[in-house]
Amino acid sequence: MVTDDSLHGRAVLTNDGVRVGELEHLLIEPGRLQVAGVQVRVPKDVADQLGIPHGLLRGTSVEVPIEQVRSIGDAVLLSVDQDALRRTKSSPTEPSTPGV
């Protein structure tokens, strides 16, 4: 069985071979209990290259629909290139402060 925790941190690569981040979470569709997509942690420098908005101190998380995921193994291979990721919805994240 594969768990979300066992996939966390795996490299995410576009179909043109560019590493764009790491797998943060699987996104599950609640009513159907199916994987709807993956949440990818995109570092600040990569977000800058892709023109994806991000927080002041850190990168961002991008939700990639499952239709754009080719395979998940030792790495997560996307079926889209960098240009398609530029058009993907992002949600800037800042570092969390414990106890806040």
Image (tube, rainbow, N blue to C red):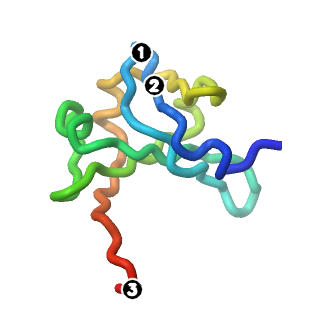
The residue closer to the viewer here, 62 or 76, is: 76
Residue 64 percent across, percent down from the top left: 48, 41
The three-letter amino acid code for the residue at tag 1 is Gly
Circle 3 Cα neighbour tier, 10 Å, few/some/many (<14 / 14–19 / ≥20): few
Q: Mark 2 touching mark 3, by CB under 8 A?
A: no
Q: Mark 1 touching mark 2, by CB under 8 A?
A: yes
Residue 17 percent across, percent down from the top left: 42, 15
Quarter of the view holding residue 86: top left
The three-letter amino acid code for the residue at tag 2 is Leu
Q: Secondary structure at mark 1?
A: loop
Circle 2 Cα neighbour tier, 10 Å, few/some/many (<14 / 14–19 / ≥20): many
Residue most extreme to the top = 16
Would you name the residue on which mark 1 appears?
Answer: 17
User: Residue drawn at (40%, 46%), measured in percent from left and top?
Assistant: 41
Residue most extreme to the front = 98
Q: Secondary structure at mark 3?
A: loop
Residue 25 percent across, percent down from the top left: 56, 51
- Residue 46, above or below 41: above
Of the 4 image quadrants, the one containing the C terminus is bottom left
The numbered mark at residue 13 is 2
Quarter of the view holding residue 45: top left
The three-letter amino acid code for the residue at tag 3 is Gly
Would you name the residue on which mark 3 appears?
Answer: 99
